[in-house]
Amino acid sequence: MSLLDVKDLSMRFGGLLAVSGFELKMEAGDLVGLIGPNGSGKSTVFNMLSGFYKPTTGSILFDGNDITGLRPDQIAARGIMRIFQNGRLFSNMTALENVLMGHHMRLRTSSPFAAVFHTPGYVRNEQGAIEECETMLQDLDLGNMKHERVGELPFGTQRKIEVARTLAARPKLLLLDEPMTGLSAEEMSDMIDYIIWVREKFNMTILLVEHTMAVIMSICPRIAVLDHGVKIVEGTPSEVQNDARVIEAYLGVEE
Amino acid sequence: MEWSTVLEYLILAVSLGGIYALMSIGYTIIYGVLKLINVAHGDFFMLAGFLSLWAVQEWNLPLWPGYLAGILITVAVGLLVERVAYRPLIEFRMSAFTSTVAVSMIIQAVAVIFLSPRSKSFPRPDIVTGVLHFGEVSVSTAIPFVIASSVVLFLLLVYLVNRTKMGIAMRALSEDRELVQLMGVSVNKVVVFSFVLSIGYAAAGAIVWGQRYPSFNPFVGAIVGLKGFVGAVIGGIGSIAGALLGGFILGAVEIILVGLFPQLSNFRDIFAYALMIGFLLFRPGGILNVKVIEEKV
Amino acid sequence: MAAKFNFKRIRSLVAIALLLLFMVWGESNLPRYYIKILHFWGIYAVLGVTLQLIYGYTGQFSLAHAALVAIGAYTTGLLTLSPETKALSFLLAPPIWPINVIEWPLLPALLLSGFLAALVGIVVGAPALRLRGDYLAIVTLGVSEIIRLLFCNLPSVCNGAMGLKGIPMRATLWGTWLVVVVTLFVVRRLVDSNYGRALKAIREDEIAAEALGVNLFYHKLLAFVVSAFFVGVAGGLMAQILGTIDPSTFGQVLSYAALTIVILGGVRSLTGTVIAAGVYTISSELLRAVEAPITVFGLDLPGVPGMRVIFFGVLLLMLILFYRKGLFGEHELSWGALQSWVRSLRSSRERV
């Protein structure tokens, strides 16, 4: 049984069919890239997978459970975490607080009463969470910035913190929505190294949407290509690179 | 119920609906252009009523110049408020909203102190104090005047919004702010025009209201303003057609409610609030299903 | 590290004890007028701190406070009035059961006030909190008004527009301020916990919060209901202090007052809010002296329009326009802050 099994997924907005018949299977540990020209429906697929859109038709099976149409927080609880295209950090909170927010879900079991009266269980959990998140920031060489407001940090650092934040939740599947957007060349290579490190260290399953072809080609063993809401090709980088349909989609039909 | 009574109620419904619609227009215009709910709108209505009253009774102006003075001064105040209290907060929606709340408080308090804490009688031409009879149907003579004024004002609005450059720019601004800015139109000028229109209609609404309900107190604006807002929500806030539709429907439903269940007349206001809450929760786009601002994921 | 922490704690506990002792002393030694002001300060402090939880921390603009205060006030009023007084003062319609026979001491009455307000908080919050920003504000305002109008129109429950008179004054200064301390404690603890982080996250970016597994509705409702409870209790205290209440006491001005206090004190600063509540209460009293005599309908009603309302309206406007951060910004009045302030005073004196 695959970790992620997406069948016949479609999204219709009024008269516009943004995505139709999308299918994808992912096993634990996979790193799959999702590419396509602007407006091909990549974000829509992501939003459906993470619960921000309710698919018009189709089903999403994750770890054996049907998660189609669930709320974003319910999907997160089941182990799917995502980052956002232009970054959605809590800019007025510190780096540590941001990463702790990733950890939040695992503290769900404590009740408000425990939080107010500082029961031993609550205090223990909170301490543990803080230590773990501090370690995660250390791993990123950001230990000294843990009490800095993230809004004031360089953009490349912010994106890495955003990824770290999702990791604090110990997800089973990570959806990375254009993590390279807005990064300099140096920051990009940094981020690529980080993604590869994350995958190796946690045996993380990753679905990566990117606009920069080169990035996807270099790190993803498997790639799916969307065009006008339809998956036209799925295969290895070289298969995709040489596929006529992909070239056509990106460059237009050759006269 | 006799048909004559039904007819009377229908006529009342139309007249009340017309006044509410005038107020709804004001809310919807400002919301469309600034995406702001102007809580103080009803208080401008009240201000106009009081100022006209004052102009006639204290400054001894004749009736119609007095009305005009009331309207003009109120619009001037509205422009001042826009410049000082709303425009600087354009970027901060919640702060702008709080600002309208503060302005509402201030206008009401100013009215209480400088105009009158108690109800005062609105000056009107004798002609509206009579009663008209059509066979078995009798209505106050103010009613035809109210209905006629409302119709004229609506027609004027339709003309201004569809045929004048400013009006079209106003509609464009409420659809797509960025585009209008790119087109080189002075957004501030359009906003000023919108305010003149919005506050002007509230003020005109006060004059019209005063013919039928000649009693103004500092808090009447809050109630009529609320009804206007509810009307705008019902029709679809941001849409002028929606405002007309919603205002009318609210006025009509209110009259019908009181007509059918006179014992519930105390619950008129509760009903309006409940209707508003119901729409905001289940159909925020109103009857015309206007597009509501959604944050992009 | 542990020793330092305990020392801070002890200092705070000592400060609280001193505060409460002062209130006990004040009860018997201060003039009636000052006692009333101190009561109001406490009540408005609770209104402010609870609104901070909803608005400052969770970012939900609620104008429901007025209605919740009304619920608390009426509950306590009806419970603490003797059956005989009620039978006499319900002129429009006789009080229904159990109101006509019930009579409770203050503490249970206050607790029930809190619970009923919390219940209403759930009823109001459940639909309203699904909305954003100004729509939420309008809906809470609408519900507030509906509740107030209902109070006007239910003569057998609360004597309609005539209200309640002669509510026995059993609240003590230290009792009121104990409520303030407890409210501060609960809100502070909540805000510093993982719940507080979630609330702040909701304020910052709901979408991101949701993607991290935060159930938006549950957290917003939590903040709302916890606040509502304490607002209800504060309402009960208000009934005690005023002795006479009617629906007009709980107009929108009450919600706006809480909002002004929150912004004045500094969004998210709890100690700032308490101090702002003091500023508000005291300046209200000072302004009363300036108020033109014709405009005062009833001296004890906090919602009386007039000079004070202009002042606070203008104040709110100024704050919003120029000084959105308020007196304290996001900082708390803490021992550390006091120490460094004292130190800076000393060093400036030395320089001279």
Image: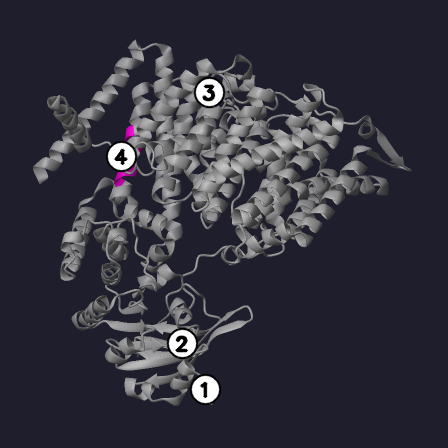
Q: Are marks 4 and 1 on the same chain?
A: no
Task: Say which of C91 and C20 sits in front.
Answer: C20
Span colored in magenta? C181-189
Residue A219 visible, this angle: yes
> Mark 4 — on which chain does it sit?
C
Callout in the foreground (3, 2): 2
From mark 1 to mark 2, how far is it between C-alphas?
14 Å
From mark 3 to mark 2, how far is it between C-alphas?
73 Å
Task: Specify the principal SS of the magenta part.
Answer: helix
Query: Circle 3 — which element?
Result: loop
Callout in the foreground (1, 3): 1
Using the rendered view, name the quadrant where residue A100 is placed. bottom left
Residue beneath disc 1? A253
Three-letter code, disc 1 = Val
Callout in the foreground (3, 4): 4
Three-letter code, disc 3 = Leu
Task: Say which of C161 and B216 sits in front.
Answer: B216
- In the picture, the disc for residue C81 is 3
- In the picture, the disc for residue C185 is 4
Mark sitting earlier along the chain (1/2):
2
